[in-house]
Amino acid sequence: MKKLLKQLTILYVSKKDSNYKKINTTLEIFFDNIIRCNNKEDALFIYKDTFPNIIIVDIDLVDSNGIELIKDIRKKNKNIPILIITNNIETHNLIEAIKLNLIDYLLKPIDVSKLIFSLNKIAKIILNSGEISTFIKKDIKYNYLEKTILHNNKTEVLTKTESRLLELLLTNKNKIVSIKEIKKVIWSDKEVSESAFKSLLNRLSKKIGKDTISNSFGIGYGLINK
């Protein structure tokens, strides 16, 4: 389950209170891709821009009640797994939470073991659904389980090396990954020719869309939101 979560992106929406560090430290153990913010406006922008796989929302945000944020997200996505964090689960909030199809709610002060249990629960739900996927761009989707790209209603199957490269770039989204690191991950310690390296990049580029992979000349490559 931990390996699965490492491949996914989580959006953590919370103020920096006494529980924040404990939760953040736990998330860093399970996720390589964590996006953080503390208000509804930023959270909605990030959601539309990055399409996270999982969301954790504190009910007490800087600019609103977390329930209102979740309502807006549910208008766009009825299935994305969402956890809510709260000081107390008042009756009206509990009723709202039930309506919003949340995975779980966690009471403060946070019990790390309960947080981990909830994360494992989410991983099982995602695994059983078969929808272990992420958006590379708004209209380009990658399925980790099937190793496929869905683009303009067309499905492309990736080879083993193509999927390794894409997953490396997704793990480091909006960063440039050095050529040395790419070669190490894809081919371990084996020698690889420049033509073979370029061929892999070109094949993947054709499958995930032209200009999706950014090139920092002589340094490396990355999936950079423009």
Image (cartoon, rainbow, N blue to C red):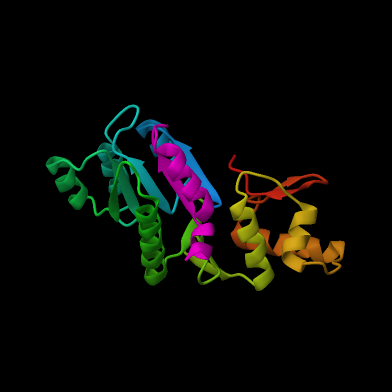
Tell me residue 155's x, y (percent): 52, 68
Judging depth in this view, the residue of 202 and 104 nearest the camera is: 104
Does the rendering let one see residue 18? yes
The answer to whether 219 appears left or right of 43 in the picture is right
**Number of numbered discs on residues:** 0
- Residue located at (73% from left, 47% from top): 215
Q: Quadrant of residue 156?
A: bottom right
Relative to 210, is 11 above or below? above
Does the rendering let one see residue 143? no
The answer to whether 89 appears left or right of 62 in the picture is left
Judging depth in this view, the residue of 87 and 66 nearest the camera is: 87
Asked if the stretch drawn in magenta spans residue 14, the answer is yes
- Residue located at (86% from left, 61% from top): 194
Tell me residue 147's x, y (percent): 55, 69
Tell me residue 202's x, y (percent): 73, 60
Asked if the stretch drawn in magenta spans residue 152, the answer is no
- Residue located at (21% from left, 48% from top): 97
Q: Quadrant of residue 157?
A: bottom right
- Residue located at (26% from left, 43% from top): 71
Task: Give the farthest residue toward the left.
Answer: 91
- Magenta range is 1-30
Task: Give the farthest residue toward the top.
Answer: 63
Relative to 22, is 207 above or below? below
Q: Quadrant of residue 72?
A: top left
Relative to 144, is 170 above or below? above
Quadrant (top left/top right/bottom left/bottom right) for the C terminus: top right
